[in-house]
Image (tube, rainbow, N blue to C red):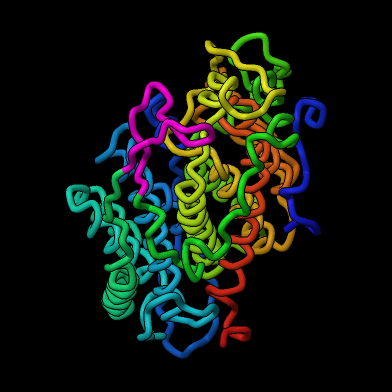
Amino acid sequence: MSKVRMAGIKMGSSNLGGGLLVAALLFGVGCERGQPEAAQNEALTDGTEVSVDGSLVVDWNNTAFEAAYQVDTKYEDPFPHLRALTMMHLAMHDAANGVQAKYARFALESSDERADPTVAAAAAAHAVLNSIYPEQRELLDAKLSEFTAGAPKSGRERGLELGEEAAQAVLASRASDHSDENEPYVPKDEPGRHRFVPPFELVYRPGWRHVVPFALESGDQFRSAPPPALDSEQYAADYEEVRNYGRLTDATRTKAQSFYADWWYELSEIGWNRIARVTWAKQSERDLWFTARLFALLNVGLMDAYIAGWDSKLHYDFWRPYTAIRAGATDQNDTTVEESDWESYCVTPPVQDYPSTHSALGAAAAAILYQVYGGDVPFTMESTSSKPPGQPHSLTSFEQAALENADSRVACGIHFRFATEAGLELGERVGEQVLASLLAPVAQAH
C-alpha cells in the first residue's frame, strides 16, 4: 500500500487539521442494503470466459450483516459474525472459481464449468450463512431465490450443487479452529497491567487469541514488540498526549478531530466492509470473480488482524489510559501526572490497550484494498457512530483512512499513541501476508 510502513507516522493534534463490543452497546449499528443489478445467468458450457456481474457479492455482504443483526440485535458479540462473513466470502470465491478458475481457491477442490457461476456463488453464501444462522432460513432462502430464478435448469442445478460443495469445504476447514474456546481472565492489580474499565467487568473473548488464522501461520507470527517501559520517556510523552488530547472535557482536540474520533468509533469490520462496498461501486472492473476475491481477502485480513491483535493484547496485558492516568502516581515514572477523576472522550472497549486492533484492522484493510484495486480510491460515506448522525466524511486515500482511523483512538482517549503505531505495523504485516498467501491469480498460483 504505502511505500513505507504507516506505523512510523504520527497523526496527533498538529497533523490533521480538519470498537469493539462497546460500539454496538452504545448505538444501533446498521448497514445499507443495495439492490442487486441483474446478474447474467448463462451457464458456462465450453470454458469460454464470460462476464458475470459481481453485485451479488455486495448484496450477500449486506445480507450477512442483516442475518447477524436479526439474531444479535445490538451486535454485542461481533467475532462470530465476522467469522461467518469471512467463511461466506471465501465460499463464494471458491464457488465462482470452481466454474472458471481465475484465482487460486481456499478450500474447494471440485470444479464444474457447466455450472451457473451466479447460482454457485449465491448457493455457497446461502449454505454458509444457513449453517450458522438457521433461524434466518426464510431470509436466506428468499435471497437465494433472487439469484436462481430464471437461470437455465442445468446450469442452475449444477450451480446449486457446486455452491453447496464450496460452502461445506470452507466450513470443514474451520471446524476445529478453536473459535468456541473459552479462557478465563483475572486482572492483576499491578502497574502497567490491564484492569477492567467501567462500565465493563470483563475482557471480551480472551480465548480468541487461540483461533487458527486464515492466512497467518499462527496468531503470534507477527507479535508486536513490547510496549515502552513505564519509566521511559516515550511512555511519559504518550501518556501526556492522551491525557490532554483524549480527555472528555477541556481537551486539545479540534472540532474536526472530535468528529472523526466519533466517526471511526464503530466496529472496524462494519466500517471497512462499507468502505469496500462504496469504493467497489467506482471500479470499472466489477465482475463476479474480482468482487468475490476482493471481499474474501478483505475479511480474511480483518479476521486475522483480530486474531493477531488478541495474541499480542493478552500477551502484554497492558493497561488502558483510563486506568494508567488515574494511577499515575504508582507507575514508576516521576514525570507522569496523576488525575484520579480523568475520563476519556469515548467509552473504552473491554480489552487490553496494546496493540490497538482498531488500528491493525484499518491498516490490513487499507493494504488489501490498495493492492487489489491497484491504487487509491477516494471515497465519501457515512458512519453509524458519527455525531451528528448521518454526517458524511471524505477521505482521499486508503492510507489516509488507516492513519486517521488509528489517530481517532488517541483522540478518543482509549489508546496510547504507541499502541496505535504498533497496531498499524501489525495490520500492514497481516495485510501483506494475506495478499502473499491466498487467492492469487491462477497464473501466479503455485
The residue at the point 41 percent across, 25 percent down is 27
Is-magenta flag for residue 187? Answer: yes
Tell which residue pokes out farthest to the bottom in this image: 46
Q: Is residue 296 visible?
A: yes
Dominant secondary structure of the residues highlighted in magenta in the image: loop
Where residue 280 appears, as percent x and y from the top left, is 60, 53
Is-magenta flag for residue 419? Answer: no
Snapshot quadrant of residue 88: bottom left
Give the residues drawn in magenta, as a range. 185-206
Where residue 143 appears, as percent x and y from the top left, is 31, 53
Towards the viewer: 101 or 2: 2
433 sits to left or right of 244: left
296 sits to left or right of 411: left
Where residue 9 appears, as percent x and y from the top left, is 78, 44
The residue at the point 53 percent across, 11 percent down is 341
Q: Is residue 12 above or below residue 71?
A: above
The image shows a total of numbered marks equal to 0
The residue at the point 43 percent across, 52 percent down is 61
Towards the viewer: 257 or 339: 339
Q: Is residue 186 above or below residue 172?
A: above
User: Which quadrant of the figure contains the N terminus?
Assistant: bottom right
Where residue 215 appears, as percent x and y from the top left, is 50, 68
Q: Is residue 156 visible?
A: no
Towards the viewer: 337 or 411: 337
209 sits to left or right of 246: left
The residue at the point 51 percent across, 42 percent down is 268
User: Which quadrant of the figure contains the C terminus?
Assistant: bottom right
Q: Is residue 229 above or below residue 105?
A: above
